[in-house]
Image: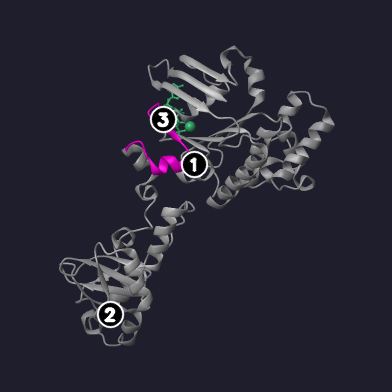
């Protein structure tokens, strides 16, 4: 267990970076430090291996005051993984992974065996990878080496400062899953810094949310999502994720696409085509200048009449038979869509004013947002 007791950090320039931080980091858990840039996450983490010294307060590791420990011995007990990977470019993978065991004067054979074991743990074949140089590995593979290097001498504590943030979303997800899998076996005390709340929700046993040098809330992801301490926490984790009841009774307003592709009735057919092409949709809702819904046109209707240069959208549009009012529950809307085999459904308020469109994509996006962390930037195309 790591404990911070009334930790303060004031830099020489008077910058107060940590304000009376009290923390307990439990043994054998993944504790995620998260918060906006500059809130003090890295400073907090680097105090654990004494790369940064508190101005006031006490930090204990397994009950022992770390300021009384030899910093070099302390650091060898603590694995450290940083964002930029930090592999030594002129050392082979095997040499990189074996750095700490060698410093600890392990026997050569024991170190080699440990390196092989660790490479296998992250599915890298030692015969293929041990003698390569870091530049001969992909970013994700290099970051795996960074992780196993931190594990090499079997430290009880591992500090990871945004270890996966430089990776593409797919490698990142893979490494998160590997970390969870490794942790199930290894049960290390891991302190993990991230900016990414999806990552925090996925891997954390405990989340510590910081802001401006203070701890705002600590708890299991589920607790924080269900009981955010204040508006900052709510906004930080995103309003929609907080609505744990979202599926029970979401309304169409929460799910709809808010700017469906539209055109005025006076538009010509070539213009209508252009709008569809631009928005990558196969139909348009037709609205008047007050945004009142007049009808819809499909690309098939437009193509069918395309030769008639003088025709406008008004000439080819069809009435919209099925609409829902703002405030309708999503389940009602979905029933209508299923029953009439609609690929989308317009949402109106008051006197037929168009305010949005339910599409299959928008429903999927909504579910994904509420229930599972989406891949970074992996939004489902929510167009018509
Ligand atoms: N040597 C220093 N002297 C003065 N201020 C510093 C120094 N090092 C860091 N700071 C300040 O301390 C604050 C906290 O920095 P820290 O690196 O802990 O933030 P962070 O939460 O890790 O941010 P990020 O998410 O951007 O990595 C920042 O405002 C930073 O500018
Ligand atoms: Mg940082």
- Residue at x-position 38% and y-position 69%: 280
Q: Nearer the viewer, residue 89 or 244?
A: 244
Q: Is mark 3 within 8 Å of ligand 1?
A: yes
Q: Which residues are magenta?
A: 210-230
On the rendered structure, is 220 left or right of 297?
A: right
340 up-or-down from 90: above or below: below
Q: Is residue 88 visible?
A: no
On the rendered structure, is 331 left or right of 348?
A: right
Most extreme residue toward the top is 68
Front disc: 2 or 1 = 1
Most extreme residue toward the right is 109
Front disc: 3 or 1 = 1
Q: Nearer the viewer, residue 235 or 107?
A: 235
On the rendered structure, is 271 left or right of 214?
A: left
Q: Nearer the viewer, residue 216 or 167?
A: 216
On the rendered structure, is 132 left or right of 313?
A: right
Residue under label 1, please give it. Answer: 200
Front disc: 3 or 2 = 3
Residue under label 3, please give it. Answer: 39
- Residue at x-position 60% and y-position 37%: 85
Q: Dot 3 lies on which element? A: loop
Q: Position of residue 305 (x, y in %)?
A: 30, 87
294 up-or-down from 55: above or below: below
Q: Are marks 3 and 2 in contact (CB under 8 Å)?
A: no
| Neighbour tally class for label 2: few under 14, some 14-19, many 20 plus, Cα within 10 Å | many
Q: Is mark 2 within 8 Å of ligand 1?
A: no
Quadrant into which the N terminus falls: top right
Residue under label 2, please give it. Answer: 269
The image quadrant that residue 349 belongs to is: bottom left
Q: Position of residue 272 (x, y in %)?
A: 29, 75
Q: Return the disc, 2 or 1, that comes first in the chain's sequence.
A: 1
């Amino acid at each position: 267990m790591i404990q911070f007791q009334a930790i303060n950090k004031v830099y020489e320039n008077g910058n107060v970076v940590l304000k009376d931080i009290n923390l307990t980091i439990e043994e054998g858990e993944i504790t995620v430090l998260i918060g906006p840039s500059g809130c003090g996450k890295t400073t907090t983490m680097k105090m654990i291996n004494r790369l940064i010294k508190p101005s006031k307060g006490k930090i204990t590791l397994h009950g022992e005051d770390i300021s009384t420990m030899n910093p070099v011995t302390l650091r060898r007990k603590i694995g450290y993984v940083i964002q930029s990977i930090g592999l030594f470019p002129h050392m082979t993978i095997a040499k990189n992974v074996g750095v700490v065991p060698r410093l600890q004067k392990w026997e050569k054979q024991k170190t080699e065996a440990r390196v092989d074991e660790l490479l296998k743990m992250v599915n890298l074949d030692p015969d293929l990878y041990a003698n390569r140089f870091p530049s001969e590995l992909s970013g994700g593979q290099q970051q795996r080496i960074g992780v196993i290097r931190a594990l090499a001498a079997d430290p009880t504590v591992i500090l990871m400062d945004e270890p996966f943030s430089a990776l593409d979303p797919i490698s990142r997800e893979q490494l998160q899953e590997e970390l969870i899998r490794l942790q199930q076996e290894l049960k290390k005390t891991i302190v993990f810094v991230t900016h990414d709340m999806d990552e925090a929700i996925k891997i954390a046993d405990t989340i510590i949310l910081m802001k401006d040098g203070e701890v705002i809330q600590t708890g299991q992801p589920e607790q924080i999502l269900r009981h955010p301490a204040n508006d900052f926490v709510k906004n930080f984790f995103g309003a929609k994720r907080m609505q744990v009841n979202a599926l029970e009774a979401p309304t169409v307003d929460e799910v709809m696409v808010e700017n469906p592709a539209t055109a005025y009735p006076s538009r010509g057919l070539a213009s209508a085509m252009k709008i569809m092409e631009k928005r990558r949709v196969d139909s348009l809702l037709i609205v008047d200048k007050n945004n009142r819904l007049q009808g819809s046109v499909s690309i098939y209707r437009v193509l069918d009449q395309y030769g008639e240069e003088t025709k406008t959208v008004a000439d080819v549009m069809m009435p919209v038979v099925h609409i829902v009012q703002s405030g309708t529950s999503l389940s009602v809307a979905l029933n209508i869509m299923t029953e009439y085999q609609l690929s989308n459904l317009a949402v109106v308020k008051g006197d037929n004013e168009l305010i949005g469109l339910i599409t299959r994509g928008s429903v999927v996006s909504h579910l994904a947002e509420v229930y599972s962390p989406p891949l970074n930037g992996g939004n489902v195309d929510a167009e018509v």
